[in-house]
Image (cartoon, rainbow, N blue to C red):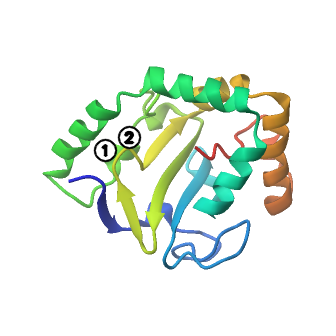
Amino acid sequence: MFPRKIKIPTCFHSLEHEGPFTKCIQCERPLDDSLYFIERAFHGSEPILEMAICEACREKICEELSAESMERIRVYQEERLDVQLRIERLAEAEQSDPDDMSPWLSECVFTKKPRSECSRYQIMAACYGNELLADVMPMLVSDDAIEEMQRLMSKQTRDRLGDLVQEHFGQPSEFADGPAPLLF
């Protein structure tokens, strides 16, 4: 039955805190009893950005993004992701090992590009307290899909997401032409 709740796997832990995320990056409220999202960006196998953001802060930031960008990204995602097929495939995969995250994170949900072929990628999960909510998420988004979605974003949206990175992480050189948070 989806969403299935499981203990948050280490691939969604914070390297900085050496364990699960404990507070929202934006408002710094504890994540104990709330819905939140984890997003981690990788260059090869090295994490270059990681964050957890509560649902309230995510919604507030999304309201600051252009409506046109959000609509273009929504259409992009709907055209490329068969939610029902994904849930069915994952339900079959979890019968062999319910705690194995690899079926969720082995390929891009939008392009089907294998993770092993991605120079950069992002993984995302929806969580509640200390549990990951496994249904459509967790998911992996490839470098190709990230670039395609960033091209669909208005300057206002790209700037706002860039500001989020700058505010919380500084502007590392990896982000000059790399991923910014997707927050979807």
Vertical comparison of 105 with 31: above or below = above
Residue designated by label 1: 103
Corner quadrant of residue 53: bottom right
Q: Nearer the viewer, residue 165 or 119?
A: 165
Q: Amino acid at mark 2?
A: Ser
Residue 38, image x, y percentages: 55, 59
The quadrant the N terminus occupies is bottom left
Q: Which mark is residue 106?
A: 2
Vertical comparison of 122 with 19: above or below = above
Q: Amino acid at mark 1?
A: Pro
Q: Which mark is residue 177?
A: none
Q: Is residue 104 left or right of residue 51?
A: left
Residue 139, image x, y percentages: 44, 44
Residue at 20 percent of width and 45 percent of height: 91
Vertical comparison of 44 with 96: above or below = above
Q: Are marks 1 and 2 in contact (CB under 8 Å)?
A: yes
Residue at 70 percent of width and 67 percent of height: 25
Secondary structure at badge 1 equals helix
Q: Nearer the viewer, residue 177 or 36?
A: 36
Residue 122, image x, y percentages: 57, 44
Badge count: 2
The quadrant the C terminus occupies is top right
| Residue 49 visible, this angle | no
Residue at 75 percent of width and 40 percent of height: 65
| Residue 79 visible, this angle | yes
Secondary structure at badge 2 equals loop
